[in-house]
Amino acid sequence: MTALTLPKRDARTRPRALLAIATAVSLAIVASFVGGPAAGAASEADSAMPRTIDVTGTGIVRGTPDVLDLVLGIEVRARSAAEALSRNSELLRKVLVRLRDANVAEDDTQTAELSVWPVTNDDGTAVIAYSVSNTLDVTLRDLDTAGSVVDAVTQIASDEIVVRGLSFSFEDNSRLVARARAEAVRQARVQAEQLAQAGDVTLGRLLSIEETSTPEGTPLPLADAKSTAEASAPIEPGTLGLSVEVHLRYEIA
């Protein structure tokens, strides 16, 4: 009978094999400890995140403005730039005198723009004059006399002084903002309660609240000084709206 004899393994390779097996087992054990708690922590974090209801409310109130912001334009054309600048400066001084006579404070007048440019002929081949434009921002705090002040200023030079625009605002709008804010929060709260009822859940505590407010209304432009002087219409401020928007986040109990 012939016996089959297996070759003997080199004794030097056995420690290496045992070391590899031990290392693999150790890594598997470490991985089980590292991976297990991390996965559990992520699951717990997800379950700990609160369920919320997010709502937005807008409160709008209206009030009578008490400030008129006026934009006056003084534009002069002359054969030379020096002559145009001189004439423009003269008219500006007269306007400021009229405003001081009307008890408009210096802090309520500000030069916003001064421009000088050449005027050419139709072909653009020659300079025939120079134009100087000056813009003056004026704040009028007495609306009862605002119409007469505008008439007095524009009548200094009917063709060279124009009203480029006007807008109304509030000297102090804190009370209006408070009313609008309260209405916005009330509206948002009602919405949150309705959503909770519709979703068959209980509305919990308020988690956060954010606010943005923007006054409504736009400037009312006037065509030119001539139309203002002829009409001599009183300045009517009417009412101006102010809105406050709030974003509320509630927890679902």
Image (cartoon, rainbow, N blue to C red):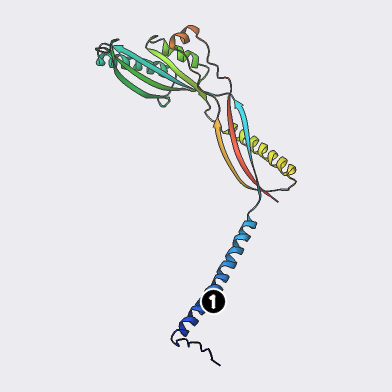
The front one of 104 and 206 is 206
Dot 1 lies on which element? helix
Q: Quadrant of residue 46?
A: bottom right
- Figure check: 238 above or below 10: above
In the rendered picture of this protein, how many numbered marks are placed on residues? 1
Q: Position of residue 124 (x, y in %)?
A: 27, 13
The front one of 155 and 247 is 247
Q: Amino acid at mark 1?
A: Val
Give me the residue at 42% from left, 23% from top: 137
Q: Residues within 10 Å of mark 1 (few under 14, many from 20)?
A: few
Give me the residue at 43% from left, 17% from top: 164
Left or right, 241 with respect to 96, comes to right
The front one of 119 and 177 is 119
Q: Position of residue 70 (x, y in %)?
A: 45, 20
> For mark 1, what is the residue?
25
Q: Position of residue 9 (x, y in %)?
A: 47, 86
Q: Quadrant of residue 28?
A: bottom right
- Figure check: 74 above or below 192: above
Left or right, 49 with respect to 17, comes to right
Give me the residue at 53% from left, 17% from top: 144
Residue most extreme to the top: 230
Residue most extreme to the front: 1
Q: Position of residue 88 (x, y in %)?
A: 32, 16
